[in-house]
């Protein structure tokens, strides 16, 4: 075969291969965006829930056994404004007081109502009220919060310095927004249920928060005294989950009757978090790398 003809065939084969590669990469991007960013529409699938008037509540406390890890100091010297507004900053991943654990997200994971219907099959009305996440003393307040998918998140900056709010969800659209001092609030919405969405500040790597995005309003966060209360629970039997950023998730079956206030305590042990905390550097500054562009 003449050399020129061979060269034409090789060039044609190379062009076809490159075209196939581009098409394949393009299709992969679309699929990734559907999962990571969502479609912008709030999850509304399910039978609209109508109150029967027989709803009750689940109350309790989050107990902590063993020796709680001592909070570690945080260096805020990189930002003088942070150091001035928060002279003795410490880590907040484990807050234990009198044997009670704070910042635990408690929520109904699944289960059935008294008439045999799946609780996850209902669509609950999304509250019109905003959920507030403030930045004060160069930390997020609250450290752990819950909200419903479709509910508005209002992020404010009470500090005399700029922040960079950066949630990193897996099922919702990721966003990264600067917020200078005295700037207007940031209003965002997570459209899909997700437990949990971690939040960081790219300006101050020690700033962390966690947002539980729920399909229903049946959740709570334990306070400094470890107490929690989930209101408006339909009669039934449910798996109630407790999530902590260091000690993971635990579930427990709870049965609640009509208009009943059911008390159910949960317990975390200090030893359970040792494996998860290995290599945790609380004071080390984070390094932000630019995103690698997709082919």
Image (tube, rainbow, N blue to C red):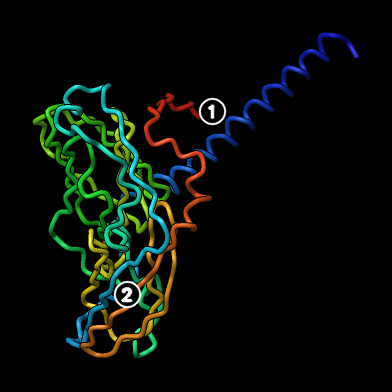
Q: Position of residue 111 (x, y in %)?
A: 40, 78
Residue 203 position in % (x across, y down)? 28, 27
Which label was assigned to residue 98?
A: none
N-terminal of the two: label 1 or label 2? 2
233 relative to 22 in the view: left or right: left
Q: Where does residue 276 sit, x and y in percent of width and height?
A: 50, 49
Q: Which residue is mark 2?
A: 122
Q: CA distance from mark 1 to mark 2?
A: 41 Å
Q: Secondary structure at mark 1?
A: loop
Q: Quadrant of the N terminus?
A: top right
Q: Which residue is drawn at the image coordinates 28% and 39% (left, top)?
A: 90
Instruction: State the image coordinates of residue 232 (x, y, percent, origin top left).
Output: 21, 77
- Who's the residue at 78% across and 19% down the image? 9
Seen in the image, is 42 located left or right of residue 67?
left
Asked which secondary structure carries label 2, the reply is strand
- Judged by depth in the image, the label closer to the viewer, 1 or 2, is 2
In this orientation, which residue lies closer to the viewer: 290 or 278? Answer: 278
């Amino acid at each position: 075969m003449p050399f020129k003809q061979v060269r034409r065939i090789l060039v044609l084969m190379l062009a076809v291969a490159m075209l196939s590669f581009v098409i394949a990469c393009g299709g992969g991007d679309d699929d990734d965006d559907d999962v990571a960013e969502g479609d912008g529409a709030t999850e509304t699938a399910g039978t609209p829930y109508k109150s029967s008037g027989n709803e009750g509540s689940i109350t309790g406390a989050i107990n902590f056994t063993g020796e709680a890890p001592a909070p570690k100091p945080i260096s805020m010297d990189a930002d003088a404004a942070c150091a001035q507004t928060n002279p003795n900053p410490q880590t907040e991943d484990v807050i234990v007081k009198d044997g009670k654990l704070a910042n635990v997200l408690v929520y109904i994971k699944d289960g059935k109502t008294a008439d045999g219907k799946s609780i996850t099959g209902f669509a609950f009305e999304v509250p019109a009220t905003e959920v507030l996440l403030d930045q004060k003393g160069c930390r997020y307040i609250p450290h752990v919060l819950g909200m419903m998918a479709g509910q508005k998140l209002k992020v404010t900056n009470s500090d005399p310095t700029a922040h960079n709010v950066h949630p990193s969800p897996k099922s919702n659209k990721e966003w990264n927004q600067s917020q200078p001092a005295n700037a207007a609030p940031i209003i965002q919405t997570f459209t899909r249920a997700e437990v949990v969405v971690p939040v960081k500040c790219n300006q101050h790597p020690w700033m962390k928060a966690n947002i539980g995005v729920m399909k229903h309003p049946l959740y709570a966060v334990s306070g400094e005294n470890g107490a929690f209360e989930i209101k408006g629970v339909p009669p039934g039997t449910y798996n109630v989950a407790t999530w902590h950023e260091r000690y993971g998730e635990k579930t427990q079956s709870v049965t609640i009757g009509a208009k009943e206030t059911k008390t159910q305590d949960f317990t975390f042990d200090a030893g359970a978090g040792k494996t998860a905390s290995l290599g945790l550097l609380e004071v080390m500054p984070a390094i932000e790398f630019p995103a690698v562009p997709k082919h």
